[in-house]
Image: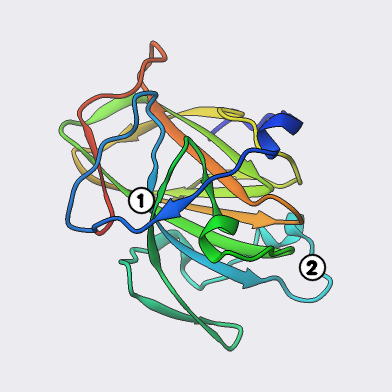
Amino acid sequence: MIVKNLFSTAALALLLCFVSNAGAADPFKPDADGYIRHWVMLAPISLPEGETGSEGIFKEQIMGEATLRPRAGDKVKVGGKELTWQNITASTNYFDFTAMVKTLNDREAGYAVTYIESETEQSDAIMAVASNDEGRIYFNGVDIYVFGEPRTLMLDADKGKVTLKKGLNVVVFKIINEQGNWQGAMRLLDKRGAPLKNVKIKLSP
């Protein structure tokens, strides 16, 4: 279980992120610092009237969210509204749901999924994450992390050890926006804190 700590910084909350389509067939690499910039994303999903993000993060907005395996173009109907999964590439070391949907959205949930292909089993990898606001992560179908309070984005706010199996690994990162900025970040490090090697990022399983 990733240790959950709360940090905040107003400066990071003011940064902007832009997204663009990326080809699902092409494997990518994490950036030079290990941050994952390529995701398949779905948003916005409105929370029920009166429900806070701290309540909603512990509920499923999509049934079976731990085992989501989307591709770009897949459609999902949630709350009577049809949404489409989209490939995105963040222009910086965090991704931004607002940049994807191009509207301000308060009290909404969104999903970001990425597929990590590892050349070998790596049992001492470190996953460093951040969310604005509440965040939850499923790794290979297992619920490994939740942060259940509003916060601004601070890179590497929470860290924990994960085992990458040889072959394909799946990350489902759910983030709920209370109001304002709606962002997330994730990178992979080795036990010395250097960006993890021998991994590729894919946009389809």
Where disc 1 sits, the SS reads strand
Q: Residue 37 at what x, y percent from top left?
A: 39, 42
22 with respect to 44 (left or right):
left
Q: Residue 204 at what x, y percent from top left?
A: 25, 59
Q: Residue 95 at what x, y percent from top left?
A: 50, 46
The residue under the point 74% across, 75% down is: 48
Q: Earlier in the sequence, mark 1 or mark 2?
A: 2
Q: Nearer the viewer, residue 189 or 138?
A: 189
Looking at the image, is 156 positioned above or below residue 144?
above
The residue under the point 75% across, 56% down is: 178
Q: Which residue is mark 2?
A: 51
Number of numbered markers: 2
Looking at the image, is 155 positioned above or below residue 184?
above
Residue 133 seen from this side: yes
The residue under the point 61% across, 45% down is: 146
Q: Which numbered disc, 1 or 2, marks the residue closer to the eye?
A: 1
**Cα–Cα span, label 1 and label 2:** 28 Å
Looking at the image, is 9 positioned above or below residue 42?
above
Q: Residue 115 at what x, y percent from top left?
A: 30, 49
Residue 24 sits in quarter: bottom left
Where disc 2 sits, the SS reads loop
The residue under the point 37% across, 15% down is: 194
111 with respect to 56 (left or right):
left
Point out which mark residue 114 bears: 1
Q: Mark 2 and mark 1 in contact (Cβ < 8 Å)?
A: no
Query: Residue flagged by tag 2: what amino acid is it?
Result: Glu
Residue situated furthest right in the rendering: 50
User: From the image, which quarter does the C terminus lie in?
Assistant: bottom left
How busy is the neighbourhood of tag 2: few (under 14 within 10 Å), some, or many (20 plus)?
Answer: few
Query: Residue flagged by tag 1: what amino acid is it?
Result: Thr
How busy is the neighbourhood of tag 1: few (under 14 within 10 Å), some, or many (20 plus)?
Answer: many
Residue 8 seen from this side: no
